[in-house]
Amino acid sequence: MKYAIGCLLFLALRCGGSSPHKAQTEKPGGAGPVVAELKTEDTGTAPSDTVAENRAPAPSPAPPDYDTAAWAEIIRLDPTILLDLRYATANNFVKEKMYDCPRCFLRPEVARALLEAQRDLQKQGLGLKMYDCYRPRPIQWKLWNKVPDPRYVADPRKGSMHNRGMAVDLTIVDAEGKELDMGTDFDYFGKEAYHSYTDHPETVLGNRKLLVETLAAHHFRSTSTEWWHYSYIPKTFPLDDWIWKCK
Protein backbone atom coordinates (compact mmCIF):
# COMPACT_ATOMS: atom_id res chain seq x y z
CA MET A 1 0.00 0.00 0.00
CA LYS A 2 2.79 2.41 0.93
CA TYR A 3 4.46 1.51 -2.33
CA ALA A 4 1.33 2.47 -4.35
CA ILE A 5 1.01 5.86 -2.58
CA GLY A 6 4.65 6.66 -3.33
CA CYS A 7 4.17 5.93 -7.02
CA LEU A 8 1.10 8.22 -7.15
CA LEU A 9 3.03 11.11 -5.53
CA PHE A 10 5.92 10.63 -7.97
CA LEU A 11 3.57 10.79 -10.97
CA ALA A 12 1.86 13.90 -9.61
CA LEU A 13 5.17 15.72 -9.25
CA ARG A 14 6.20 14.76 -12.76
CA CYS A 15 2.98 16.04 -14.29
CA GLY A 16 3.14 19.37 -12.50
CA GLY A 17 6.85 20.03 -13.26
CA SER A 18 8.22 22.53 -15.70
CA SER A 19 8.62 21.87 -19.40
CA PRO A 20 12.20 21.12 -20.39
CA HIS A 21 11.80 23.38 -23.44
CA LYS A 22 11.20 26.66 -21.58
CA ALA A 23 13.31 28.46 -19.03
CA GLN A 24 11.32 30.08 -16.20
CA THR A 25 12.02 32.99 -13.95
CA GLU A 26 10.01 34.26 -10.99
CA LYS A 27 7.99 37.42 -11.38
CA PRO A 28 8.65 40.07 -8.75
CA GLY A 29 6.20 39.75 -5.87
CA GLY A 30 5.66 36.02 -6.41
CA ALA A 31 3.15 36.50 -9.23
CA GLY A 32 4.19 33.27 -10.89
CA PRO A 33 6.71 32.13 -13.46
CA VAL A 34 7.58 34.16 -16.56
CA VAL A 35 8.84 32.44 -19.68
CA ALA A 36 12.20 33.92 -20.78
CA GLU A 37 12.36 33.98 -24.57
CA LEU A 38 15.70 33.99 -26.39
CA LYS A 39 16.20 36.55 -29.21
CA THR A 40 18.74 36.50 -32.00
CA GLU A 41 20.73 39.65 -33.07
CA ASP A 42 19.96 41.21 -36.46
CA THR A 43 23.30 41.13 -38.25
CA GLY A 44 22.08 42.12 -41.68
CA THR A 45 24.20 45.31 -41.74
CA ALA A 46 27.78 45.35 -40.50
CA PRO A 47 28.74 48.26 -38.20
CA SER A 48 31.40 49.39 -40.63
CA ASP A 49 28.81 49.61 -43.40
CA THR A 50 26.60 51.77 -41.20
CA VAL A 51 29.47 54.17 -40.45
CA ALA A 52 30.29 54.47 -44.13
CA GLU A 53 26.66 55.20 -44.99
CA ASN A 54 26.35 57.87 -42.28
CA ARG A 55 29.67 59.60 -42.95
CA ALA A 56 29.22 63.11 -44.38
CA PRO A 57 30.93 63.68 -47.74
CA ALA A 58 34.05 65.86 -47.71
CA PRO A 59 33.21 69.49 -48.55
CA SER A 60 34.21 70.60 -52.03
CA PRO A 61 36.68 73.49 -52.24
CA ALA A 62 35.15 76.83 -53.11
CA PRO A 63 35.42 77.65 -56.81
CA PRO A 64 38.06 80.20 -57.78
CA ASP A 65 36.94 83.82 -57.58
CA TYR A 66 39.36 84.96 -60.27
CA ASP A 67 40.11 84.33 -63.94
CA THR A 68 42.05 81.05 -63.91
CA ALA A 69 43.19 81.59 -67.49
CA ALA A 70 45.03 84.74 -66.42
CA TRP A 71 46.00 83.96 -62.83
CA ALA A 72 46.94 81.13 -60.50
CA GLU A 73 46.75 81.34 -56.70
CA ILE A 74 49.76 79.62 -55.19
CA ILE A 75 48.03 78.38 -52.03
CA ARG A 76 45.41 76.56 -54.13
CA LEU A 77 48.09 74.85 -56.20
CA ASP A 78 50.37 73.89 -53.32
CA PRO A 79 49.44 74.71 -49.70
CA THR A 80 52.91 73.59 -48.53
CA ILE A 81 54.35 76.87 -49.85
CA LEU A 82 54.31 79.29 -46.92
CA LEU A 83 53.07 82.87 -47.13
CA ASP A 84 54.46 85.89 -45.31
CA LEU A 85 53.10 88.60 -47.57
CA ARG A 86 54.65 91.66 -46.01
CA TYR A 87 52.67 94.28 -47.95
CA ALA A 88 49.48 92.93 -46.42
CA THR A 89 50.94 94.04 -43.07
CA ALA A 90 52.86 97.03 -41.75
CA ASN A 91 56.00 94.87 -41.48
CA ASN A 92 57.65 96.29 -44.61
CA PHE A 93 60.00 99.09 -45.54
CA VAL A 94 57.23 101.71 -45.89
CA LYS A 95 55.72 100.65 -42.51
CA GLU A 96 52.24 100.71 -43.96
CA LYS A 97 49.74 98.05 -45.07
CA MET A 98 49.43 98.10 -48.86
CA TYR A 99 47.20 95.07 -49.58
CA ASP A 100 43.75 94.64 -48.06
CA CYS A 101 44.37 90.91 -47.60
CA PRO A 102 47.24 88.47 -48.16
CA ARG A 103 46.84 86.46 -51.35
CA CYS A 104 49.63 85.30 -53.66
CA PHE A 105 48.89 85.27 -57.40
CA LEU A 106 51.13 84.67 -60.40
CA ARG A 107 50.65 84.02 -64.08
CA PRO A 108 49.82 80.30 -64.44
CA GLU A 109 53.03 79.52 -66.32
CA VAL A 110 55.10 81.28 -63.67
CA ALA A 111 53.25 79.50 -60.89
CA ARG A 112 53.94 76.09 -62.45
CA ALA A 113 57.65 76.86 -62.64
CA LEU A 114 57.64 77.90 -59.00
CA LEU A 115 55.95 74.63 -58.01
CA GLU A 116 58.77 72.70 -59.68
CA ALA A 117 61.29 74.66 -57.60
CA GLN A 118 59.28 73.81 -54.49
CA ARG A 119 59.41 70.09 -55.34
CA ASP A 120 63.19 70.25 -55.75
CA LEU A 121 63.58 71.82 -52.31
CA GLN A 122 61.17 69.35 -50.71
CA LYS A 123 63.49 66.51 -51.72
CA GLN A 124 66.01 68.14 -49.35
CA GLY A 125 63.51 68.67 -46.54
CA LEU A 126 63.16 72.36 -47.41
CA GLY A 127 60.53 74.63 -48.97
CA LEU A 128 59.64 78.14 -50.11
CA LYS A 129 58.15 81.09 -48.27
CA MET A 130 56.66 83.97 -50.27
CA TYR A 131 57.11 87.62 -49.31
CA ASP A 132 55.45 89.10 -52.40
CA CYS A 133 53.95 87.86 -55.67
CA TYR A 134 51.80 89.71 -58.20
CA ARG A 135 51.46 93.35 -57.21
CA PRO A 136 48.62 95.33 -58.82
CA ARG A 137 49.78 98.54 -60.45
CA PRO A 138 47.52 100.70 -58.24
CA ILE A 139 49.54 99.33 -55.30
CA GLN A 140 52.74 100.21 -57.18
CA TRP A 141 51.48 103.79 -57.30
CA LYS A 142 50.89 103.73 -53.54
CA LEU A 143 54.46 102.56 -52.98
CA TRP A 144 55.82 105.13 -55.42
CA ASN A 145 53.96 107.94 -53.68
CA LYS A 146 55.54 106.84 -50.41
CA VAL A 147 59.06 106.32 -51.81
CA PRO A 148 59.47 107.92 -55.27
CA ASP A 149 62.98 106.53 -55.70
CA PRO A 150 63.63 104.05 -58.57
CA ARG A 151 66.45 102.48 -56.56
CA TYR A 152 63.83 101.00 -54.23
CA VAL A 153 60.48 101.19 -56.05
CA ALA A 154 59.88 100.79 -59.79
CA ASP A 155 58.23 103.77 -61.44
CA PRO A 156 54.60 102.66 -62.02
CA ARG A 157 54.52 104.44 -65.37
CA LYS A 158 57.05 101.89 -66.54
CA GLY A 159 55.84 99.17 -64.22
CA SER A 160 57.70 96.32 -62.57
CA MET A 161 57.92 92.57 -63.06
CA HIS A 162 55.65 92.24 -60.02
CA ASN A 163 52.98 94.24 -61.86
CA ARG A 164 53.11 91.66 -64.64
CA GLY A 165 52.68 88.66 -62.32
CA MET A 166 56.09 87.28 -63.27
CA ALA A 167 58.23 88.22 -60.27
CA VAL A 168 58.50 86.77 -56.77
CA ASP A 169 60.08 87.83 -53.49
CA LEU A 170 60.84 84.73 -51.44
CA THR A 171 63.18 82.73 -49.25
CA ILE A 172 63.85 79.13 -48.19
CA VAL A 173 62.55 77.52 -44.99
CA ASP A 174 63.46 74.28 -43.25
CA ALA A 175 61.12 71.40 -42.45
CA GLU A 176 59.75 73.28 -39.44
CA GLY A 177 59.05 76.45 -41.42
CA LYS A 178 62.06 78.36 -40.07
CA GLU A 179 63.74 80.69 -42.54
CA LEU A 180 67.29 79.88 -43.56
CA ASP A 181 69.76 82.63 -42.72
CA MET A 182 70.20 84.87 -45.76
CA GLY A 183 72.25 87.55 -44.01
CA THR A 184 69.59 90.28 -44.00
CA ASP A 185 65.84 90.59 -43.72
CA PHE A 186 63.56 90.99 -46.72
CA ASP A 187 63.51 94.54 -48.16
CA TYR A 188 66.84 95.46 -46.58
CA PHE A 189 68.29 98.09 -48.89
CA GLY A 190 71.99 97.96 -48.23
CA LYS A 191 75.07 96.36 -49.74
CA GLU A 192 74.70 93.37 -47.39
CA ALA A 193 71.66 92.30 -49.44
CA TYR A 194 73.64 92.30 -52.72
CA HIS A 195 74.58 89.00 -54.28
CA SER A 196 78.07 90.41 -54.79
CA TYR A 197 78.56 90.97 -51.06
CA THR A 198 80.58 88.01 -49.80
CA ASP A 199 81.49 89.14 -46.29
CA HIS A 200 78.88 86.78 -44.82
CA PRO A 201 79.38 83.47 -43.01
CA GLU A 202 79.71 80.45 -45.31
CA THR A 203 76.29 79.26 -44.16
CA VAL A 204 74.65 82.43 -45.46
CA LEU A 205 76.53 82.29 -48.76
CA GLY A 206 75.55 78.64 -49.14
CA ASN A 207 71.88 79.41 -48.50
CA ARG A 208 71.86 82.19 -51.07
CA LYS A 209 73.61 79.94 -53.57
CA LEU A 210 70.98 77.25 -53.05
CA LEU A 211 68.19 79.77 -53.69
CA VAL A 212 69.86 81.10 -56.84
CA GLU A 213 70.57 77.67 -58.29
CA THR A 214 67.15 76.22 -57.46
CA LEU A 215 65.25 79.06 -59.09
CA ALA A 216 67.64 79.37 -62.03
CA ALA A 217 66.95 75.70 -62.83
CA HIS A 218 63.32 76.71 -63.38
CA HIS A 219 63.94 79.87 -65.43
CA PHE A 220 63.99 82.54 -62.73
CA ARG A 221 66.69 85.22 -62.77
CA SER A 222 67.97 86.97 -59.66
CA THR A 223 68.34 90.71 -59.11
CA SER A 224 71.84 91.82 -58.15
CA THR A 225 70.84 94.08 -55.26
CA GLU A 226 68.09 91.97 -53.65
CA TRP A 227 68.79 88.34 -52.68
CA TRP A 228 65.00 87.70 -52.36
CA HIS A 229 63.83 88.96 -55.78
CA TYR A 230 63.49 86.72 -58.86
CA SER A 231 61.84 87.21 -62.25
CA TYR A 232 60.58 84.61 -64.69
CA ILE A 233 62.50 84.99 -67.97
CA PRO A 234 61.13 82.70 -70.74
CA LYS A 235 58.38 85.15 -71.70
CA THR A 236 56.83 88.44 -70.68
CA PHE A 237 53.30 89.35 -69.63
CA PRO A 238 51.37 92.63 -69.77
CA LEU A 239 51.15 95.07 -66.89
CA ASP A 240 47.95 94.59 -64.93
CA ASP A 241 45.74 96.64 -62.60
CA TRP A 242 43.57 93.74 -61.37
CA ILE A 243 43.10 93.66 -57.58
CA TRP A 244 41.98 90.41 -55.98
CA LYS A 245 39.00 90.06 -53.71
CA CYS A 246 39.29 89.44 -49.99
CA LYS A 247 37.55 86.30 -48.77
Image: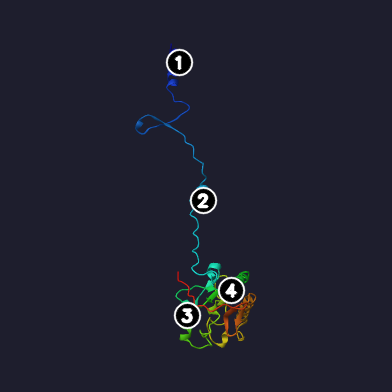
Amino acid carrying mark 4 in the image: Val
Give the label, 2 or 4, closer to the camera.
4
Quarter occupied by the C terminus:
bottom left
- Disc 1 and disc 3: Cα gap in Å? 116 Å
Q: How is the image coloured?
A: rainbow
Dot 2 or dot 1, earlier in sequence? 1
- Disc 3 and disc 4: Cα gap in Å? 22 Å
User: Mark 3 = which residue?
Assistant: 138
Give the label, 3 or 4, closer to the camera.
3
Give the label, 1 or 4, closer to the camera.
4
Across and down, in percent, residue 174 comes to 58, 72
| Visible residue check, residue 78 | no
Q: How many marks?
A: 4
Q: Secondary structure at mark 1?
A: helix
User: Mark 1 = which residue?
Assistant: 7
- Disc 2 and disc 3: Cα gap in Å? 51 Å
Give the label, 2 or 1, closer to the camera.
2
Dot 1 or dot 4, earlier in sequence? 1
User: Mark 2 = which residue?
Assistant: 52
Labelled pair 2, 1 in contact (Cβ < 8 Å): no
User: Mark 4 = which residue?
Assistant: 110
Amino acid carrying mark 3 in the image: Pro
Labelled pair 2, 4 in contact (Cβ < 8 Å): no
